[in-house]
Structure formats: C-alpha cells, structure tokens
Image (cartoon, grey):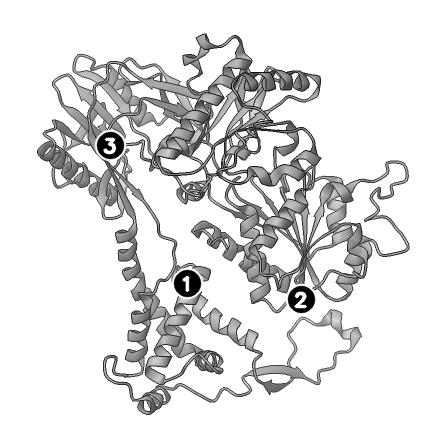
Amino acid sequence: MKKLKLYQEKAVDKLLSRTNEYINEKENQTIVFQAPTGSGKTFMITKYIEALINETTTDLCFVWVSIGKGDLHKQSYKSVKRELSEKIECTILEDDYFGSKVNINQNEILFLNWEKIRAKDSKTNEWKNVIMKDRETLNFIDVLQNTRTLNRQIILIIDESHSSANSERATEIRDTIVKPNLTIEMSATPIFSNADTRITVNYNDVIQEGMIKNEVLINPGIETIVDDVNDSQELILEAALRKRIDLLDKYKKVNSIVNPLILIQLPNGAAGDEIKDSVISFLRDKGITEESGKVAIWLTDEKINNEADKLLKIDGRVEVLIFKQAIDTGWDCPRSQILVRFRESTSITFEIQTVGRILRMPEAKHYDHEELNSAYVFTNIQSILVKKEEYNPNIIKTNYAKRSNDYKNIELTSFYKKRIDFGDVTSSYYSVFEKYFCEEFDIDLEGIPNYYDNHEKLKQKGVTFDFENMDQVISNEIISTDKIDQMNESITSDMISINYNPMDLQIKYENIIKENLNGFAPRRSMSTIKQATFYTFKKHMNLNTARGGVIYIQNIIVKNSEIFSKIYDLSLKTYKKIHEYEVNQKNEWKINNKFEIPISQSFNSETTKKIDSNLSVIKPLYVTLGLNNEINSLEKEFIDYIESKNEFINWFWQNGAEHMESNLGIKVSSNKTFQPDFIISFKNGYIGIFDTKATDYNVSDTKEKAEALQYYIKEENHNKNKKLMGGIIIKDGPHFRFNDNKTYNNFTTHPEDWK
C-alpha cells in the first residue's frame, strides 16, 4: 500500500483533530477540504477514514457521494477499497443493496452516485430513482433513518463538491435526508462558503514532493512548425505528437518506462463529430490507429467506465485518447501529459479543473529533465483568458520569452537542494529514548542490567505498578427527563473501577506520545517511538512484548503518564537536533557546474506584466506582480537604471525567485540556497550577481545571503577562472548602493561599507 506524503500526513491529522472535536461536541458541522488537483484527495480521505476508525470509540459510518457523470462512485469505491484493510466494509448503493440491509453498518463506507439520487419529477416533486422512491421494501431514506435510530453517527463525504454541493437539491439531500453529524466537502476549487472549518493543502508542498507538475505550457514552440502544416487544426495536432515523441525520448534517458499520453478533447455537438473524423484521419496517416491499440476513443460515459483501467498503467500502449467533456473531472491517468483542445468559441477560460487531467506526475516524483515536470496544452483558440487560481496562481503559462542570440555561455555553478525530510522519527531515536529513560531512573546505561534493581529504581522515582482497575464508569445515576433541558453541568456520580479495554488503553498510550512529538509527524513516527520504548523496557526491565507484554508496558506508561511524558518530551527534543543533521546529510544537493540562463521561459498572464526593455537577455521581459497587482517598485527602478547604462552593459537577466533548477541558486548553508535577483553582463568582461533589498529588509537573513554570495564569487573566480563580482543592492535616495564586503554590515550602521 502507498504511504502518505508529509503534506498528506499533516492534512489527515488536521481532519482527525477537527472530526474529534465536532463529532463529540457538535452536530451538523462542515469541513471544507481544499487540495490541489493531483495532490491525492481521495487517498488522503481514505487514510483519514482508516485512522478515524482505528482511533475512535464513536459508533460511525460513512456516506461517500461522488459528483459527476458516469460511474465515478464506482471508481472512488475501487480506489478507496484498494488502500483499506479488508476489515473495513465498502459497499455501493445500487438496487441490490436493499436485500437484507436495513441500515448502514458500523464503520461501513457506502458509495453512491449523486446523479442517481438527486432527480425529482418537476410536477409531482417525487424522486425519480427507485433507490429514493417509496416502495414496499426499504429505500435509501429508510436505511438512513434506521442508521440514525441506532445512534450511529453519519459522516457525509462529498467528492468534487464544487460541481453541485451548494445547489438547492444538494442542500435538501444533505440536511433533510442524510442529516449527517459531519460533512466533509473535498475539492480543488470548493464553492461552499458556510464552512465551520477549512483545511487547505498548500500547492507548493504538493509540487515539492513531486506529486504534480511545475507548470502548464500552452502552445510552446508552435511557431517552428507553422510551415509544415495546412491549417490550425493540423498545427496543434502535429505539435502535440512531436512533443509526445520528445517527452518519450526524455523518459527513456532517465530510465523511466512512462509512455506519455495525449488527451484530445473534442467540441460538443456536430462540430465535435466532424473534428473527430479529421483527427482520426490525421492520426491514421501517422500510423496511430485504434486497430494498432495506440488510440482509444471515449465519447460516452459507458465507454469511459468500461475501459478506464487500460489507460492507467504508466507504460500503457495507448498513445492518444479522444474524448468529449465527460472526463473533465473525477478521472485521473497520471501518464497524461498533453491536452489538445479545439476551438468552440472565440474565448475560453483555462481553469485548473480543465487541465487537471494532465497535472499528476506519473511516478509521483520530479525528473532531472525539466520538460518532464511540465504539462502541455495545444489549442487553436484565438483568445485565451487564464483564470487566476488562489492556490496555484502561476501554473498555467501562456506568455513565452526567448533568450537573445547575443548571449554567450557563462557556465556558472548553481545549487539546488531537494528536500527529502518527511518529518518522521527514525531508528536512531532508540538510543536517545534509552538514554533519557536511564537518566530518569538512575539506571546504568552501559552495564549488565540488574532487572530487580532497575524495577526498584523505578519505584523509588514514583513509578506505580498497580494498574488494576484503572478505568472508571458512572454507576447508578438517574436523571429525570423533565430536568434534562435544564442541565448545564457534567454528571457527577458514584463510579465503578474496572480494567481498561485494550483498545482504549492503546489510544491513551498513543495520546501520551502525540502530546510530546515536538513537531514530528504522528502517523510516520508512532511505530518507531513505540519500538524504541519496547526495546528499552526489554533491555533494562526484561519485559518482552510477547504474552501480554505490550499491554503491561502500556499500562505502566499510562498509569505514570506524567513521568513518561517528561521522558518522551526531552528525548524527542534532543532527537530533533539529531534528526535535522540526518536530514541535511540525506537531502540531495544537485549541483549544475554549467548553469546557463534558460533558452526560453514561460509566464502566467495573471501574475506577470510585460515591460519594455532593450537590455534584457530574455525577450520580451516579463516581471512578477506583487501586492495589488503592482510591479515591485525597487526592482522596476533598478531595471530602469540598468537600461540607462547601455554603454557599460551587454545584457541583464532577472532570476526567478522559485526554488527550481532552472533558476541560479547560491548555497547559503548545509540545507539552504537562495536565488539572487539579477545577473548582469558588463562590457568589460565581468559578470555581476546582485540581490536587491528594500529598506525594511531582514538584516540577519540578508547578512547570511550576502556573505554566502561573496564566498560563491570568490570560489568561482578561483576555481573556474571567472570574472564575477556583485553583492546586495539598496536604494539610498536617488542613488543605488551595493555592498560586496566579505563580512556584511547593513547600511544603517556602516554606510562606509557601501559603494
């Protein structure tokens, strides 16, 4: 089974925390779970359900509603069931569900199709589907009512909630029929506004872990093949095929078996039928046919549902899928990388749901070839409006710029740090826990253990081994029904003492660990911390995990929680420093000794603005917009200043701020890089590297970067015989000043250091 990525782990923990709060204290609450397309929403919710079932004592069941055409609920059912233990029951709401079934079972996940339950007759206001209609046997409404009668709490999960979740009929089904105790609406672009909680997965975290592509490029390089085709339709088809061949070659170079897939989306109506015939003819001339198994055609929901699996393998034979609107949401094939869209109107809005089918990384990782980390759209639409997405505003790129022919190679060294820290406690924690355990109880860490003496030492430190009847239950309490509404305090009564149920004991034990994790990922770390604990008890107390030993150790820790909380807290705080060192050793430095300014760059029309420039080596020059969609005033003034010095300057390049291999990175420390703002080629042969700072900059952060930059310049000049210079730039009244000292001091305290 797949493991959760770090961002997924955090999202699951947030969902569990809110669920425990709402389930136990409130009713009819809504959590909006917003996660980017391709981040694994279904997988995260699956693991959330699994963890909730394992950790809670509340009587629960789940109703999973899939919104969209076709049998998306069956796809969700397969995806969820594949990742769950067989002990968790997954069922589909169909006619045969109502045989002996009178209610939804405890911990059962019931999948249903939104389209099949929502329709009503406009005249009679009666439900159209037999599943909802009144009949001699039970209907779905009866099953839900019977479930609630058992005091079983219902969690409603609405998949792709942006589609219909806020409609009048959806509200009716949720609030008057299902009547859930908790609703979770999951979508990349949720529209539900009355949420009690919104849990959001950060887009950059998803990219960083290699789950989705860096960007979507629209019509890259089509100008180079215009003379090879007859019309705009052939142009985008030819461009898509060439791009597929290029990507396939690059996958082979990184030893991957991925066979990139082209999705060709036909227009609706008669126009789509005509284009379909011409597309098939065009592909046939290229030797790409249905008969050869290289083309699949999906024009109906039935076709999609019956043949979906054959495209999912990353090395699947199909090269081109022709479809209509049916798979715009809810279906994912990770090897899909190229989308062809034909003209339906003079304008179209490209939204994340539209291109979401090509965003996933096929092997859940990024590759050394940057082109493999991008998705591609080829379209003959004349006017494109790119909708700005709140959580990933830069993903869709429609503006392109190319490097000037005047450019000469600079071959700089660039550093890129690929983080692989998953926030989990590793086996090196064993010795740390053991150390603090032995220190707490004055036990000899290295000597041959004396089990009797060690047992007595724990007693002397206050550890109690009497853990019989640790749990307590209310006894013989009577409440008059006419007093219930006036009660505003908790019940106090006689209590009966009894042993903990093993499951309750485990939950209490794990909660002690969770409370002292000091930032480590709970689910990734729990097993290791437990094993470190059991290892120490076995070594120094002769307590084995076999024959009830685990329960015995858990009882000791729960009964003496204050003492062991201290040990967990101190040991995990100390281990955190060790973990940081381990991470720094594991994190992969990628060093490009022959870094060049990219041959071409792509930009999002919503987040950048084109400005006039004669000296920019990338033409045209696009600069990033900041607050209020305004250009950073300091950067714009500096660009204007550079432009006025053309007698001294060949060209300049504005480096990207993103932590990417295509941007120049300077090594700051063992686990950190930064991207300086500008590279300038001077006519005297020098290359300048500069980072601009406003007057309110962070002094300590800037000092670190400034001194790292000077060290970098010194090393490049010495080892590679370069002519580099540069430093930190500020604006002092009408003047620009820069600091290139080996030891950095800010302008306020040492103005004499600035030139």
268 or 227: nearer the eye? 227
Mark before the other along the chain sequence, 2 or 3: 2
Image location of residue 446, percent across then percent down: 23, 80
Question: What is the secondary structure assignment of the residue under circle 2?
Answer: loop
Which residue lies under the disc numbered 2?
A: 59
Tell me, for residue 525, which label it has, or none: 1
For the residue marked with disc 1, what is the amino acid? Ser
Question: What is the secondary structure assignment of the residue under circle 1?
Answer: helix
Q: CB under 8 Å between callouts 2 and 1?
A: no
Up-down relation of residue 568 to residue 63 (above or below): below
Question: What is the secondary structure assignment of the residue under circle 3?
Answer: strand
For the residue marked with disc 2, what is the amino acid? Asp
Which residue lies under the disc numbered 3?
A: 691
**692 left or right, relative to 249:** left
Image location of residue 271, percent across then percent down: 67, 16
At 28% across and 33% down in the image, what residue appears? 694
Depth check, mark 2 against mark 3: the one in front is 2
Residues at marks 1 and 3, CA–CA distance in whole angstroms: 40 Å
At 33% across and 67% down in the image, what residue appears? 429
Mark before the other along the chain sequence, 1 or 3: 1
Residues at marks 2 and 3, CA–CA distance in whole angstroms: 58 Å
Where is the C terminus found, in terms of image quarters? top left
Depth check, mark 1 against mark 3: the one in front is 1
At 47% across and 34% down in the image, what residue appears? 259
**670 left or right, relative to 156:** left
Mark before the other along the chain sequence, 2 or 1: 2
Q: How many marks?
A: 3
Asked if residue 190 shows in the view, the reply is: no
207 or 179: nearer the eye? 207
